[in-house]
Image (cartoon, helix red, strand yellow):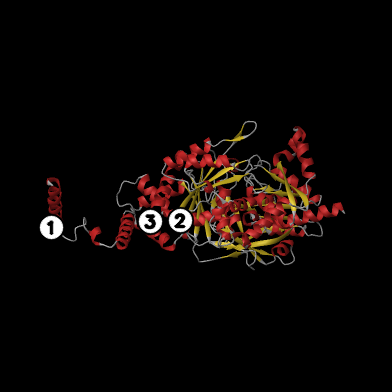
Amino acid sequence: MLHSMSNLILKCCWLAFLALIPPAHPFLSPLQQPQRQRLATNDASRHGRLLRSLPPSLETLVAETIDSDRKIVIVTGGVLSGIGKGVTASSMGVLFRAMGYRVTALKIDPYLNVDAGTMSPLEHGEVFVLDDGGETDLDLGNYERFLSVSLTKESNLSTGKIYQSVIERERIGDYLGKTVQVVPHVSDAIQEWILRVAKAPVSRFSKSSSESEISTDEPPEVCIVELGGTLGDIESMPFVEALRQLQDNVGYKNLCFAHVSLVPEMGDPPEQKTKPTQHSVKQMMSMGLSPDFLCCRGSTPLEPGTVSKLSMFTAVPKGAIISLHDVSNIYRVPLMMIEQNLHSMLLQRLRMGPFQKGLDYSTAGSMHVDHIAIEDSVVIKDWKKLAACVDEPESECVIAVVGKYIVQGDAYLSVTKALTHAAMATKQRLRIEWIEASTLEPADDDEQGDGATSWERLKNCDGCVVPGGFGSRGMEGKIAAIQYCRQNEKPFLGICLGMQAAVIEYCRNELGTEKAHSAEFFDDLVKDEEDAVIFMPEGDRERMGGTMRLGARETILKEGSAARRLYGKEKVMERHRHRYEVNPALVPRLEEAGLEFVGRNTDESGERMEIVELSDKSHPYFVACQFHPEFTSRPELPNPLFLGLMQACKTAIVGEKA
């Protein structure tokens, strides 16, 4: 009885104390609001506190991203580099394209270079050039080819670019005297860059339009971001922290992570090992990131036991563990993702479709309803045809690529892709013979056994491509290969330095100028006689980075030429990357001798030679161009010059069989 009285007295005292507190006191305000209103207020105040802690420029971008309901997919990689993040990111973009979304992409490279322009192809692979002149990582080529878009130089972010930006802002006083640090200043700058790219409109390529490139002012709805390198690399730490903050800022439903890892097979019989992926995810989580999807690379499909073990140790649902095993060609990767329902899971995770809470993706019977019928989309139907064309060709075509960087498989990646696109369009199986240009030089033919072997391989090919490059090594071998193709009516395509080599070869063997060469390699050539290739007047000999003639330039095609017939129009835009050009003073003499300059560009510096060819009466296909046609080739829309080469090869093959 006494105990009950004590409790009653305490309650009365507590109520009397509460009555003395003003109604506006924050301690009581939640008690005085309906639950629904209280939750809304809490959400708004939380969002307000978050935005007030950001710099104004980032705050504006975050608010715009949230209001636009724009989605960001981050693709990271673990265990080792070159694991396939680029193809994975591009393939996810294909899924969004097929579902009707506008997609853009961003590649983050943690190296200190401002861009890839000064990097050696032997170390870094090819430099991919964009319409606006950006010299970027080769993965942007994958994005453009898979997404059918034209990206900008802002779509490739490096540590050098971000630090250059931050230091410039510090110099002009943007940080108001504060101590500039990696966090928050560099991490904020990274987030701003990502969100700016995510909302920037991009041009789209379309094979159904009279113009292959369609400009649009509509902002993207999805941005795929690939973090280069391997998680754990010291140089990528600022980007990892920025991505962690970015998810907090834009919200869980607007950003997700896909982690690409390796599941190797060892032993006899082979057993799939999950430990590398376990440790990779553990390291990722220690940095504050959690994978929503686990994309596992391996030689064979993941076994059910492997999936269960990975799910248990990584906390990733079984259905969100995607097997990216080896397939016959990369065009089957998006189709493989569809088979595992990744497109529906992306919609579910990013709240882009009818959201259903608590779905289990581990069994087919409980999969999210595919309300968009992705396999009926035009994109996926075309993609299936592309994959089938690679696997089911009508004939085989062997193309020799005579270059100087052939020991690095990625040095001529876009050339390989462009040849593949043209081979698919002509229903041929492509086989490339990689020939080191220096082994075709006369000195090597006498002194090394591989010289004769290289010549034999070249002669057995159906066609030849001499791609671009820099430096004198292998130049004489390229010239010799071009001479052989010209004199033996072997289909030939020269690109950039390949066109310059073709002009030098013609000067030597048709005009009789034995010492004709390029001013890039010799500075004592007789002016307007031996200098078949000259330095461009507006060029910069002191600074190397970003000083070449870069980006898309207009070329006017001559009526009746093979190039005009292939392109089907008078004016075309193609991408350039060069410091030297054909000497215009020699053009009249060369044309009199039979070398036709059928593509010319007129700009502020005067007339430039863009395409040369031999008449189809004297050669089945002999075309060379100063620009890089490989950069604008797409799986659904092969570049016309590569298509012409493969068509000429197929015609010759059919003629030989007949």
437, above or below 105, in the image: above
Of badges 3 and 2, the one in the foreground is 2
From mark 2 to mark 1, how far is it between C-alphas? 45 Å
Category of crowding for the residue at label 3, using alpha-carbon neighbours closer than 10 angstroms: few (below 14), some (14–19), many (at least 20): many
Q: CA distance from mark 3 to mark 1?
A: 44 Å
Name which of mark 3 and mark 2 comes first in the sequence.
Answer: 3
Position in image of residue 78 (x %, y %): 51, 41
Q: Secondary structure at mark 1?
A: helix
80 relative position to 399: left or right:
left
Q: Give the class, few, some or many, for how many residues have Cα within 10 Å of label 2's Cα (few <14, many ≥20).
A: few
Q: Which residue is mark 1?
A: 20
Mark 2 residue type = Lys
Tell me, for residue 357, which label it has, or none: 2
Nearer the observer, 2 or 24: 2
| Residue for point 43% across, 42% down | 285
- Quarter of the picture containing the C terminus is bottom right
- Which residue is rendered at x = 76% and y = 33% of the image? 449
The outermost residue toward the right is 658
**Which amino acid type is marked by label 1?**
Leu
Give left or right: position of 333 versus 316: right
Report if residue 636 is visible in the image. Answer: no
Q: Could you tell me the amino acid type at mark 3? A: Leu
Question: Residue at the location (56% across, 35% down)?
Answer: 273
Q: Please tell me which residue lies in front, 382 or 485.
A: 382
Residue in front for this viewpoint, 149 or 283: 283
Residue 7, visible in the rendered structure: yes
Q: Mark 3 — residue?
A: 58
Q: Secondary structure at mark 3?
A: helix
Q: Secondary structure at mark 2?
A: loop
The reply, left or right, for residue 50 in relation to residue 378 is: left
Q: Residue at x 68, y 41 (%)?
A: 474
